[in-house]
Image (cartoon, rainbow, N blue to C red):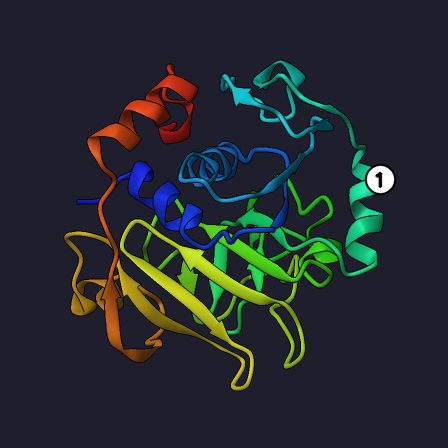
């Protein structure tokens, strides 16, 4: 079955030449996805919560806000500057993960259960509600593909799903790639990670998604790509 390395490759494949991207806190897979896309030769401007502009290399630690993660930067771009960039419609990509995502693309990073008396209180959304509406594209990742992460309706909307004219959203899970169809306001299954089937994907979700035929079979991570991910992340923080 695919692991986090295949999820990271799925994320990297969503990046394009010319993208200005930003990675936030607790975003090790996003950092690695950016590095992998740059290794493939894609011209990407890399901004991050540690405020190191255009790092040449990375060495992952448990905190992606640690400036020591980013090596050989060309300068500093503050998070306040990035928020202003997003406000002006110039931030191409923002990365997110979540505890829950529903068919409408709403994400929950706040609580599981009732907000006043939750079963689990989560870290919260930080700038999620702001950036998810202002970046041109949102790339999400889930470490778990299950009926508790992909739900019919989130327990709490930390950040709302896209509007008709809003950003484009894609989600990479250990089983599948979803894209948000802004015209109908729903997630659509568009790709399978290696080893997954459509039935396997649907049977492990809390709702039945629409399917865009033909469904793409994503390429597995190569030995060379795994070697690079291990170089950038020698302690395998990405899988913790």
- Across and down, in percent, residue 70 comes to 60, 20
For the point 25% across and 29% down, the residue is 224
In this rendering, the answer to whether 200 lies above or below 73 is below
- Across and down, in percent, residue 129 comes to 72, 57
For the point 29% across and 43% down, the residue is 6
Is any atom of residue 233 visible in this view?
A: no
- Across and down, in percent, residue 55 comes to 61, 25
The quarter of the displayed image where residue 234 is located = top left
Element type at mark 1: helix
Would residue 237 appear left or right of 64 to someone viewing this image? left
**Residue located beneath label 1 in the image:** 80
Would residue 87 appear left or right of 232 to someone viewing this image? right
Q: Nearer the viewer, residue 10 or 112?
A: 10
Q: Nearer the viewer, residue 156 or 25?
A: 25
Would residue 166 appear left or right of 85 to someone viewing this image? left
Would residue 116 appear left or right of 97 to someone viewing this image? right
The quarter of the displayed image where residue 65 is located = top right
Is any atom of residue 39 visible in this view?
A: yes
For the point 14% across and 52% down, the residue is 195
Q: Nearer the viewer, residue 31 or 185?
A: 31
In this rendering, the answer to whether 9 lies above or below 86 is above
Total marks placed: 1
Quadrant position of the C terminus in the picture: top left
């Amino acid at each position: 079955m695919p692991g986090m390395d295949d999820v990271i490759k799925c994320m990297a494949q969503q990046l394009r030449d010319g993208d200005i991207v930003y990675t936030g806190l607790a975003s090790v897979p996003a950092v690695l996805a950016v590095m992998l896309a740059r290794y493939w030769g894609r011209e990407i401007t890399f901004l991050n919560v540690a405020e190191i502009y255009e790092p040449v290399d990375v060495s992952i630690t448990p905190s992606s806000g640690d400036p020591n993660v980013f090596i050989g930067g060309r300068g500093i771009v503050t998070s306040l500057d990035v928020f202003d960039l997003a406000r002006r419609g110039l931030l191409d990509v923002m990365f997110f993960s979540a505890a829950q995502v529903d068919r409408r693309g709403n994400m929950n990073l706040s609580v599981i259960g009732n907000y006043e008396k939750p079963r689990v209180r989560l870290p919260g959304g930080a700038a999620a509600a702001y950036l998810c509406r202002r970046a041109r594209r949102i790339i999400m990742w889930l470490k778990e593909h299950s009926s508790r992460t992909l739900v019919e309706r989130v327990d709490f909307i930390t950040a709302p799903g896209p509007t008709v004219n809003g950003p484009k959203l894609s989600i990479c899970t250990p089983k599948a790639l979803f894209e948000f169809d802004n015209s109908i306001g729903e997630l659509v299954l568009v790709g399978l990670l290696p080893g997954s089937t459509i039935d396997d994907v649907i049977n492990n979700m809390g709702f039945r998604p629409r399917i865009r035929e033909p469904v793409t079979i994503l390429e597995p991570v190569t030995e060379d790509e795994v070697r690079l991910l291990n170089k950038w992340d020698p302690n395998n923080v990405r899988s913790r």
